[in-house]
Structure formats: C-alpha cells, structure tokens
Image (cartoon, rainbow, N blue to C red):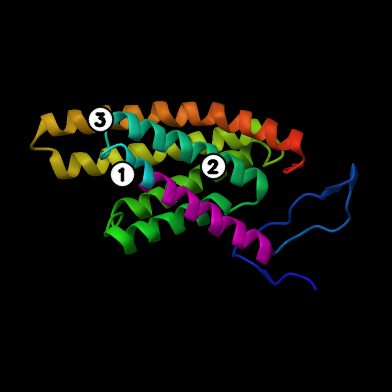
C-alpha cells in the first residue's frame, strides 16, 4: 500500500532517488506519510530534549544553553539527511514553535521570525545545490540559526532598549548559543558518518 502524499505550495520535484547504486526514474513531488511522521518525531525529540536539558541544568544557564543549541543543530542536520526536501526544516521548527506556544506560552513574537530564518536557511541550501551534500545542509542550518539569533537580538533590543545592561546580557547569551550551534554542526557531521556507516541513512 502506498503512503498518502501531500503537495505543499511551491514544492519542486526531487532529483532521482538512488537505490542500490542506480538512479530511480521516479521523481517524488509529494510528501509521504513516513516523511511527515519523521519530521514530527524529530521536532518532538528536539523540543523534549531541550526542555529536559534546561531542567537538568537548573535553568537556562550558559552550559545548558550551549548544549541545547548543540543538540538542536545535530538533530536538525540528521533530520535534513533523513528527509532531504525543501520545507523540512521550516516544518520542524514550526512544530517546535507551536509546542512552545501551547506548553509555555512562548514564541508568540520569536516563533514567526524563526520560521522566516528557516526559509533563509533552506534558500541557502538550494543556492548551494540542494540536499545532496552534507556541507550544504550544515551551511543551511548555520544560516537559519544566525538569522534566528539576529531576530532574537532585534526583539531584545525592542523590549530592553532602555536597559543597556540587560541587552548586553542577552547578547552574551546569543553568542553562547551560536557557539553551541557551531559545535552542533561538527557533531552533526560525525553523527552522519556513523549513521551512514551503520546503514541507517544512505543519503
């Protein structure tokens, strides 16, 4: 039985799939149920793990903040290899933002900006040649994270522009998060090598 398929606006055909070293003539233009479930599962894992890290660290201190961003980048790189399609990152981040909004009332302002940042990241991946190379995916994740953090700083400035000291603290935390994202890109590449070696991901 074939999986149900959903077409998103602006979705473009994927390159031929490679099966046992040979290119398949079937070009997928629709989302399959498995892909959507995979995105939902990864988004839930990302959100649940970051919440557990925050609780384990006694709050959002610099160590847990760096670890959260590292884990996020690692899992996002793995997800984009598992579901190498346009809109994957945007859908995953949209789900995590919705979870934050429903559970903790967070992300009303920052959520939409994060989704736009993901669109920029996916645009960078497309400009570099698509999801066929790990390098392109890593660059796309980094672009999305940088844009998201820039948007976060902009929102912080709007809220705390009359309190420069608080803005400096926010800038330091954003810088720590960026370091965690950079470390996550390294661990993401290593994870992909191990998953390919184990045969879990063939892309």
Within 10 Å of the Cα at label 1, are there few (<14), some (14-19), or many (20+) other Cα atoms? few
Q: Are marks 1 and 2 in contact (CB under 8 Å)?
A: no
* Image quadrant assignment for residue 27: bottom right
**Nearest the camera: 126 or 163?**
163
Sequence-first disc among 1 and 2? 1
Residue 128 x %, y %: 64, 35
Residue 33 x %, y %: 66, 66
Position of the N terminus, as image quadrant, is bottom right
Location of residue 35 with respect to 192 vertically, above or below: below
- Residue pointed to by mark 1: 55
- Residue pointed to by mark 2: 75
Q: Are marks 3 and 1 in contact (CB under 8 Å)?
A: no
Picture mark count: 3
* Image quadrant assignment for residue 155: top left
Q: Is residue 58 visible?
A: yes
Segment tinted magenta in the rendering? 31-51
Please name which of the two marks, 3 or 2, marks the residue nearer to the observer.
Answer: 2
Sequence-first disc among 3 and 2? 2
- Residue pointed to by mark 3: 171
């Amino acid at each position: 039985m074939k999986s149900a398929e959903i077409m998103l606006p602006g979705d473009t055909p994927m390159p031929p799939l490679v099966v046992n070293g040979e290119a398949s003539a079937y070009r997928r233009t629709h989302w399959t149920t498995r892909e959507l479930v995979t995105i939902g599962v990864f988004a839930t894992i990302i959100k649940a793990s970051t919440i557990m890290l925050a609780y384990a660290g006694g709050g959002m201190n610099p160590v847990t903040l760096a670890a959260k961003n590292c884990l996020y980048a690692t899992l996002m790189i793995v997800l984009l290899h598992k579901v190498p399609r346009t809109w994957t990152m945007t859908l995953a981040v949209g789900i995590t933002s919705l979870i934050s909004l429903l559970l903790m009332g967070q992300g009303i302002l920052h959520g939409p900006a994060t989704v736009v940042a993901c669109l920029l990241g996916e645009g960078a991946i497309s400009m570099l040649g698509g999801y066929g190379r790990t390098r392109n995916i890593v660059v796309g994740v980094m672009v999305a994270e940088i844009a998201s953090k820039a948007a976060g700083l902009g929102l912080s400035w709007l809220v705390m522009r009359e309190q420069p000291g608080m803005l400096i603290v926010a800038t330091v935390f954003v810088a720590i998060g960026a370091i965690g994202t950079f470390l996550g890109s390294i661990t993401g590449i290593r994870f992909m090598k191990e998953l390919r070696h184990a045969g879990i991901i063939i892309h």
